[in-house]
Image (spheres, rainbow, N blue to C red):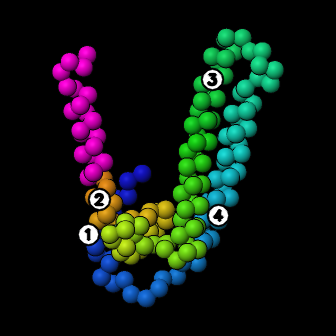
Amino acid sequence: MQPTLKSKEGHDLKKAAGPRDLSNYREIFEDIEKELRVELAKEERNFLSSVPADGSATRNHMADSNAPNYAAETRAALIKENLRHIAAAKKRLKNGTFGICVDPECGARIEDARLFKNPFVDKCYPCQQEDDKEAARQRKLNQCRGTLPGKH
Ligand SMILES: [Zn+2]
């Protein structure tokens, strides 16, 4: 879920003046949360219904039911992760840190366009870029380690 923001680094920070109206976000979060909970209940029903109640499934049945089972479980996990994002965002709304970069060395106001596009972001664009760079560096490092001679 990479945000694709076209504005330049720190673009919106300069015009960050006065408090912004965050009441919309509260509603947005409530709506998304409601939807997600419905989805989650659905997935959990799928997940449970694919597990035989008496546990007497044959091997074949197990193999048949494991695929949808796994998919429902994966989707449920994803939904739960999104619910956690919402809970965190709601908490930030409540304590007044919503829309502020969580990087302890930054604390800048997150760009409006960026926040509007993804209300779950908790870092400003420059900080997110730093993070992404670091993540990419780690991936590269891991790849290099993976191809070291003598590992086969
Ligand atoms: Zn920042």
**C-alpha distance separating marks 1 and 2:** 9 Å
- To which residue does mark 4 refer? 31
**C-alpha distance separating marks 3 and 2:** 39 Å
Quarter of the image for residue 104 reads bottom left
- To which residue does mark 3 refer? 66
Task: Tell whether label 4 touches label 2 (CB within 8 Å).
Answer: no
- Horizontal placement of 79 versus 99: left or right? right
Image label count: 4
Of badges 2 and 4, nearer the viewer stands: 2
Q: Mostly what secondary structure, the magenta segment?
A: helix
Of badges 3 and 4, nearer the viewer stands: 3
N-terminal label among 1 and 2: 1
N-terminal label among 1 and 4: 1
Look at the image and give the residue range highlighted in magenta. 133-152
N-terminal label among 3 and 2: 3
Tell me if residue 88 comes above or below residue 77 in the rendering: below
Decide which of 102, 38 is in the foreground and name it. Answer: 102
Membership of 84 in magenta stretch: no
N-terminal label among 2 and 4: 4
Of badges 1 and 4, nearer the viewer stands: 1
